[in-house]
Amino acid sequence: PFHKYIPEFDLYSKSLPASFDWWKQGKVTPAKSQGACGSCWAFASVGAMESKILIAGGPAYDLSEQQQVSCNKEMWGCNGGNMTALRFWYNEKPFKETCAPYEASDNVPCDKFSHCPGVDYNTTGYYTVTLWINIT
């Protein structure tokens, strides 16, 4: 299944280091401005995908948030969305920002980007931790 659950995180936490930071490892891309569009969900999912590619040993990409806003019909454009937007890349490849630049608008049709080649990465699933604990 695309979406999997980890029922008890504490089963895995005993082997974790005291601290770990993907930013310090150079695997988190810089924050960007969403402007006057309620597309924080697109920026979160794109940032997660950019980091996923870096963590997997791929190159640093500046991926298109506008692709998510314009083309992901499971979300609501500038009216919001959530992290399940990552499912979009199960069947689609992400576009680079240079081909599908952010316009802070949900009035940009997806077919405007039909010429954009996708980068050769997608997602195969994600996990949700259903039982949280404090790790001290």
Image: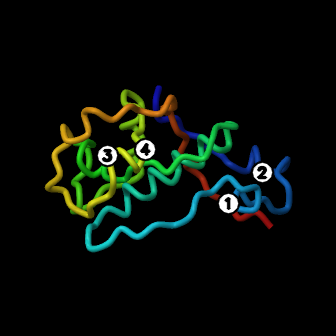
Badge 3 vs badge 4, beta-carbon distance below 8 Å: no
Q: Which mark is residue 96?
A: 4
Three-letter code for the amino acid on which mark 2 is drawn: Ser
Total count of labels: 4
Residue 63 on image: x %, y %: 45, 48
* Residue at the (58%, 58%) spot, across then down: 29
* Residue at the (44%, 51%) spot, across then down: 45
- Of circles 1 and 3, the one toward us is 3
Q: Which mark is residue 67?
A: 3
Residues 76 and 111: in front is 111
Badge 3 vs badge 2, beta-carbon distance below 8 Å: no
Badge 1 vs badge 2, beta-carbon distance below 8 Å: yes
Q: Which mark is residue 46?
A: none
Q: Disc 4 and disc 1: Cα gap in Å?
A: 37 Å
Residue 60 on image: x %, y %: 60, 47
Mark 1 or mark 2: name the one nearer the start of the chain.
Answer: 2
Mark 4 or mark 2: name the one nearer the start of the chain.
Answer: 2
Mark 4 or mark 1: name the one nearer the start of the chain.
Answer: 4
- Of circles 3 and 2, the one toward us is 3
- Of circles 1 and 2, the one toward us is 2
Mark 4 lies on a secondary structure that is loop
The residue identified by callout 1 is: 133
Residue 81 image-quadrant placement: bottom left
The residue identified by callout 2 is: 13
* Residue at the (37%, 31%) spot, across then down: 92
Q: Is 36 left or right of 15, judged from the image as shown?
A: left
Q: Disc 3 and disc 2: Cα gap in Å?
A: 36 Å
Residue 114 on image: x %, y %: 25, 33
Three-letter code for the amino acid on which mark 1 is drawn: Ile
Residue 37 image-quadrant placement: bottom left
- Of circles 4 and 1, the one toward us is 4
